[in-house]
Image (tube, rainbow, N blue to C red):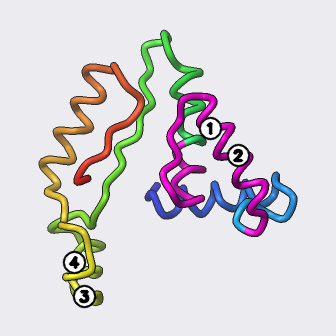
Amino acid sequence: MSTTALTDITRRELDRRANGGLERNPTRLDAYTAELAADGIEAAGFTGDIAARHYLHTPHADLGGTGVYAGLLQITGPVGDSDAGNFVLENYDPALLPEPQNPVDLADAMWDLYLKRDRFDQVVGA
């Protein structure tokens, strides 16, 4: 499942659960962000990013000690040499976009998360 699809699903679920949805209710968004901070989760700045990260943190915590690892690799730009990355680079001003991420670097970062299992997430390209 793509990050966009996961973000859309998570956003719909948050809209269903929160009164009027987090995006339309700044007071609830502030409370949710504070709740995440209290749990040691740093807000990423966008509701979808916050929601996706929090959504994925739950199985990470629940699966701890079972031998199953759930983690999150956050990518700050288009994936180079991919259909989606090429579409973005062809249709948007490259000067306004983050640097494309090398797929080999992404694979190495995910493999590192999986092998070490010493953290929940890693940001690549920041």
Task: Tell me the amino acid under the disc marked 4.
Answer: Asn
Observer-nearest of 24 and 27: 27
Dot 1 corresponds to which residue? Answer: 36
Q: How far is disc 2 from disc 1 in space, using C-alphas?
A: 6 Å
Most extreme residue toward the top, as rendered? 65
Q: Earlier in the sequence, mark 2 or mark 3?
A: 2
Dot 3 corresponds to which residue? Answer: 93
Q: How far is disc 4 from disc 1 in space, using C-alphas?
A: 34 Å
Answer few, some or many: residues within 10 Å of disc 3's Cα (few below 14, many 20 plus, some between 14 and 19).
Answer: few
Q: Earlier in the sequence, mark 4 or mark 3?
A: 4
Q: How far is disc 2 from disc 3 in space, using C-alphas?
A: 34 Å
Magenta highlight range: 24-53
Q: Earlier in the sequence, mark 2 or mark 4?
A: 2
Q: How far is disc 1 from disc 3 in space, using C-alphas?
A: 34 Å
Q: Earlier in the sequence, mark 4 or mark 1?
A: 1
Dot 2 corresponds to which residue? Answer: 32
